[in-house]
Amino acid sequence: MTIVLRELEDGELDLLFEWEQDRAAVEMAAFTRADPSDRGAFDAHYERIRNDPSVVLRAIDNGNGLVGTIGSFTMDGEREVTYWIDPGRWGQGIASAALSAFLKLDPTRPLLARVAVHNLGSATVLLRAGFLEIGSETSYADGLGRDVVEHIYRLSR
C-alpha cells in the first residue's frame, strides 16, 4: 500500500468534520469532543493544533486523496501519537502504513499512544508497529459521556 504523509489542506477540513461525526468512529476513539456536531469546537481545535509548532500533523493520502490524519503532540511532558482513519476505510491497512511512515517522520522516543480498551483494531496497529502496552487508566471520555478504560502503549526504539 502506498501512503503519502503531507500537509493537511484547508479544503479537507469539511471531510474530517464529517468523519469525526461518525458514531462508530466516535465510539472507537472515545476521547473526542463532547458534541461531534459542534463545528465551532471542531474549527477551534484544528486551528489550535495547526498553529502549535510543537504539534506534527499530517494528512494521510493513498494517492487518490485524503484517507485520514496522523500526528504527534506533547501532553504532560510526554510525546503521543494519534491518528484518525476514514471509517469507510477501516481494515485496509491504512493506519498501519501511515504509522510506519510517521515513525520515520517524527523520531521522538519514547512515544506514547492511548487506545480505548474496546478499540482492538487500533491496539493491533500499535503492537505491530512495536509499541508495548505499559498500563491502563480510566478516564472520562467526552465523546461517549462516560468513563472508559484506555490502554497506554509506549514505543522506546
Image (tube, rainbow, N blue to C red):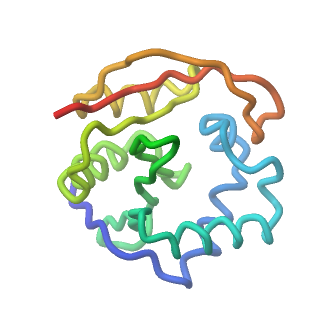
Residue 101, percent from left and from top: 22, 54
Q: What residue appears at the point 60 percent right and 74 percent down from the top-left corner?
A: 13
- In terms of depth relative to the viewer, which is nearer, 45 or 30? 45
Residue 39, percent from left and from top: 78, 69
- In terms of depth relative to the viewer, which is nearer, 109 or 38? 109
Seen as rendered, the residue at the extreme top is: 135
Residue 143, percent from left and from top: 75, 41
- State the image quarter where residue 144 is shown: top right
Q: What residue appears at the point 73 percent right and 44 percent down from the top-left corner?
A: 23
Left or right, 113 with reference to 101: right
Total labels: the figure holds 0
- State the image quarter where residue 19 is shown: bottom right
Q: What residue appears at the point 35 percent right and 72 percent down from the top-left corner?
A: 64
- In terms of depth relative to the viewer, which is nearer, 78 or 132? 78
Residue 45, percent from left and from top: 66, 65
User: In the rendered image, which quarter contains the C terminus?
Assistant: top left
Seen as rendered, the residue at the extreme front is: 77
- In terms of depth relative to the viewer, which is nearer, 102 or 138? 138
Q: Is residue 46 above or below residue 130?
A: below
Left or right, 104 with reference to 96: left
Q: Is residue 6 above or below residue 155?
A: below
